[in-house]
Image (spheres, helix red, strand yellow):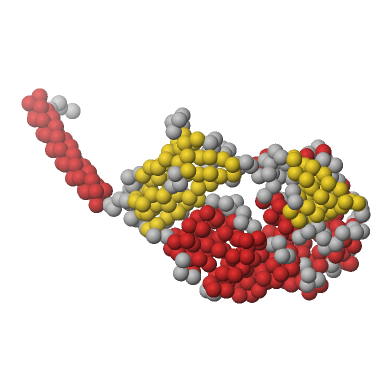
């Protein structure tokens, strides 16, 4: 093959080089134009704007139960970001990005005062950073506030498992007492056992509060102080005794009582078998509870207590309609069971039957005069049925009965909001939210009642 003359090769090389330069320059020009377009588009994207930040200047909370409300107004739908920084150490203690896209307007978040490991924050001063990220990726200019965290004494916890004394329990365990809470199991080496309380004791008072009914027990446990000697009055056989217990803080938890409950069930007494099933349900072991229930004799399975167990199991498995049938059966067998009436109300409420739910909760409150939650739920059902003036009386009665019950406070707050006292109601609802341990319920109250009403 003949080689091209040098001058032709040079000319071809120059032409190729020129073409390459022209191509590159053209590509660069296109890139610049595209980049300019992207910048123009990005500039045109709306950016969320935050305003009206609400953070408590001082948060006074019970140890182990510290949480606070963050309120902010956003101009666009956005994910809210909260960052908690210790002012003294400059350490970021927690950072939370809400997965839900909050619509434009007033937004409230209930924030747990914990670090990234779930441990409560130490008392001190914190910087609260609140930001927002829109669906288009644009970030708002963050707002900041300072919060002082102060703790009060912790709540105590008792390491036992009890159930209410009812006709079936009383007959099964041959109890002399017709009311109170029967101890079904204790932690063998815990404070309750060390105080001399044993299986089969019937507790009638805790720290001066009657626990003859489930409502009384709930109030006593909410108000139980930790790290203090507390008198517990009980009946053993026909003898009344007082035992002093120093309860640890409730964040320490209770060791599993599965083994002592299984040992109690081996006695063959139906009451202890029911307690074992109820404990499994309460600790999320539905399959274990199902197996226990399947072993009951036809006679035991026909009792009101067995119907309650079936209802509790179905409620735990999120089958409220099926649970309702068993609550109804329990009440048909024994109309005096306040726990069954309360469960019936929850099932009716969950299935959208608000007026019927209000009637069931009213029945539960009439059967258990110490049950602030029954009165509170009666009021909430009336409010959901758009009958706020019928909610006022049970809501006020619930707060009077137990001012520490967050459900009582919430029901009264909503009654205020719906009967022409919005400012008082909003303030009361905020107070109730920081007391509730049920995050899902708190979010429902925020979305349904607080955000639409707050200015």
Task: Name the residue nearer the viewer: 57 or 322.
Answer: 57
Q: Using residue 235 as the reference point, say whether residue 23 is left or right of it.
A: left
Task: Name the residue nearer the viewer: 356 or 277.
Answer: 356
Q: Using residue 29 as the reference point, say whether residue 167 is left or right of it.
A: right
The residue located at (10%, 24%) in the rendering is 6
Residue 48 on image: x %, y %:
33, 51
- From the viewer's perspective, is residue 252 above or below residue 222? above
Which of the 4 quarters of the picture holds residue 155? top right
**What quarter of the picture does the N terminus occupy?**
top left
Q: Using residue 147 as the reference point, say whether residue 38 is left or right of it.
A: left
Task: Name the residue nearer the viewer: 204 or 336.
Answer: 204
Task: Name the residue nearer the viewer: 319 or 263.
Answer: 263
The residue located at (74%, 53%) in the rendering is 209
- From the viewer's perspective, is residue 288 above or below residue 449? above
Residue 111 on image: x %, y %:
50, 47
Residue 193 on image: x %, y %:
82, 41
The residue located at (38%, 49%) in the rendering is 53
**What quarter of the picture does the C terminus occupy?**
bottom left
- From the viewer's perspective, is residue 30 above or below residue 122? below
**Does residue 244 appear anywhere in the picture?**
yes
How many marks are shown on the rendered structure?
0
Q: Residue furthest top?
A: 6
**Does residue 322 appear anywhere in the picture?**
no
Q: Using residue 79 as the reference point, say whether residue 365 is left or right of it.
A: right
Residue 161 on image: x %, y %:
78, 50
The residue located at (59%, 66%) in the rendering is 395
Which of the 4 quarters of the picture holds residue 190? top right
């Amino acid at each position: 093959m003949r080689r091209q003359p040098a001058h032709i090769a040079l000319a071809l090389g120059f032409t190729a080089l020129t073409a390459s330069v022209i191509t590159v320059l053209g590509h660069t020009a296109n890139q610049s134009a595209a980049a300019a377009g992207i910048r123009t588009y990005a500039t045109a994207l709306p950016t969320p704007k935050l305003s009206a930040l609400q953070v408590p200047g001082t948060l006074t909370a019970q140890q182990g139960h510290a949480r606070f409300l963050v309120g902010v107004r956003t101009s666009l739908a956005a994910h809210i970001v909260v960052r908690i920084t210790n002012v003294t150490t400059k350490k970021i203690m927690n950072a939370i990005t809400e997965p839900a896209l909050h619509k434009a307007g007033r937004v409230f978040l209930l924030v747990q005062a914990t670090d990234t490991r779930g441990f409560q924050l130490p008392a001190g001063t914190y910087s609260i950073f609140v930001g927002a990220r829109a669906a288009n990726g644009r970030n708002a200019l963050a707002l900041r506030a300072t919060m002082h965290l102060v703790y009060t004494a912790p709540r105590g916890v008792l390491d036992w498992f009890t159930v209410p004394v009812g006709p079936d329990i009383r007959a099964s365990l041959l109890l002399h007492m017709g009311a109170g809470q029967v101890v079904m199991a204790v932690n063998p080496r815990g404070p309750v056992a060390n105080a001399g309380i044993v299986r089969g004791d019937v507790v009638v008072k805790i720290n001066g509060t009657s626990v003859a009914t489930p409502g009384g027990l709930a109030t006593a446990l909410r108000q139980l102080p930790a790290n203090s000697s507390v008198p517990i009055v009980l009946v053993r056989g026909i003898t009344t005794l007082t035992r002093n217990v120093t309860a640890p803080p409730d964040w320490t938890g209770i060791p599993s009582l599965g083994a002592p409950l299984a040992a109690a069930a081996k006695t063959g007494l139906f009451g202890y078998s029911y307690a074992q099933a109820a404990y499994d349900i309460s600790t999320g072991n539905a399959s274990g509870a199902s197996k226990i229930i399947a072993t009951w004799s036809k006679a035991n399975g026909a009792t009101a207590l067995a119907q309650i167990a079936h209802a509790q199991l179905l409620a735990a498995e999120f089958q409220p309609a099926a649970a309702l049938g068993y609550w109804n059966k329990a009440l048909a067998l024994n109309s005096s069971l306040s726990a069954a009436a309360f469960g019936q109300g929850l099932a009716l409420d969950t299935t959208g039957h608000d007026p019927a739910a209000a009637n069931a909760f009213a029945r539960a409150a009439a059967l258990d005069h110490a049950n602030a939650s029954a009165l509170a739920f009666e009021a909430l059902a009336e409010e959901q049925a758009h009958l706020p003036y019928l909610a006022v009386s049970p809501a006020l009665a619930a707060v009077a009965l137990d001012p520490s019950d967050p459900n009582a406070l919430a029901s009264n707050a909503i009654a205020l909001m719906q009967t022409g006292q919005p400012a008082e109601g909003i303030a009361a609802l905020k107070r109730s939210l920081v007391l509730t341990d049920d995050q899902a319920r708190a979010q429902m109250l925020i979305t349904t009642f607080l955000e639409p009403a707050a200015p």
